[in-house]
Amino acid sequence: MVELLLVLVIAYLIGSIPTGYIIVKLFTGQDIRTIGSGSTGATNVKRVMGKKWFFTVMILDAIKGAVPVILAKVLTTAFAGIGLLPVIAAVAVILGHSKSIFLKFTGGKSVASGVGTILALNWMVGLTIAGIWAIITYFSKYVSLGSIIALAISPFLMLGFKEPLAYIIYCAIGAIYIIYLHRENIQRLIKGEENKVR
């Protein structure tokens, strides 16, 4: 129980580090939450600071997602057979990113950090969904569409790689949560009003 609580708290706090908010604030003095979609994620950062910072924030958020999961896999012993604590870490990271305690429980949509958690659980699945995201985003020019489809596929990939049930359930619930966070994007996609990336 002590390990579980430590994993939950530490992973949430790491996930809460508002990478995009910090970078935009440091370099422009602006509050990213008042710009564009109001998200602190990489796509909204791109609107303010360009493509280089889009990739920078995306990579940093992915690392932020992966680190607590890796630490939970390496350093904890409780529930090791079913892979529960790495999944607890993954859930806490995503919640931290989207509901940051440092930003009055606002944040991003947890795509990059979510992919980071999946990379840490199974790097082959993580790289596969990252590739799917890149292909769909490149051809459709919609980051949101690539994110939704890639993460929706993730539980089936975990199943295909015969990972623990906890990993599969995490990917399924995580996909539903991230799709829920994209509900306004989905409405704009249906109406043909979603912003494209160049």
Image (cartoon, rainbow, N blue to C red):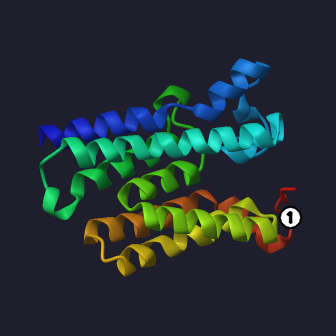
The three-letter amino acid code for the residue at tag 1 is Glu
Check disc 1 and report its element: helix, strand or loop. loop
**Label 1: few (<14), some or many (≥20) within 10 Å?**
few
Question: Residue at horizontal 85%, vertical 60%?
Answer: 196
- 61 w.r.t. 101: above or below: below
- 29 w.r.t. 103: above or below: above
Q: Which residue is mark 1?
A: 193
Question: Residue at horizontal 82%, vertical 62%?
Answer: 194
Q: Is residue 145 left or right of residue 123?
A: right
Q: Is residue 3 left or right of residue 116?
A: left
Residue 122 image position (x, y, % from top left): 38, 62
Picture quarter with the C terminus? bottom right
Q: Picture quarter containing residue 39? A: top right
Picture quarter with the N terminus? top left
Work out whether residue 198 can be spotted.
yes
- 173 w.r.t. 62: above or below: below
Question: Residue at horizontal 26%, vertical 45%?
Answer: 72
Residue 65 image position (x, y, % from top left): 46, 45
- 139 w.r.t. 85: above or below: below
Residue 46 image position (x, y, % from top left): 78, 42
Work out whether residue 107 can be spotted.
no
Residue 85 image position (x, y, % from top left): 24, 51
State the count of labels.
1
Question: Residue at horizontal 31%, vertical 55%?
Answer: 87
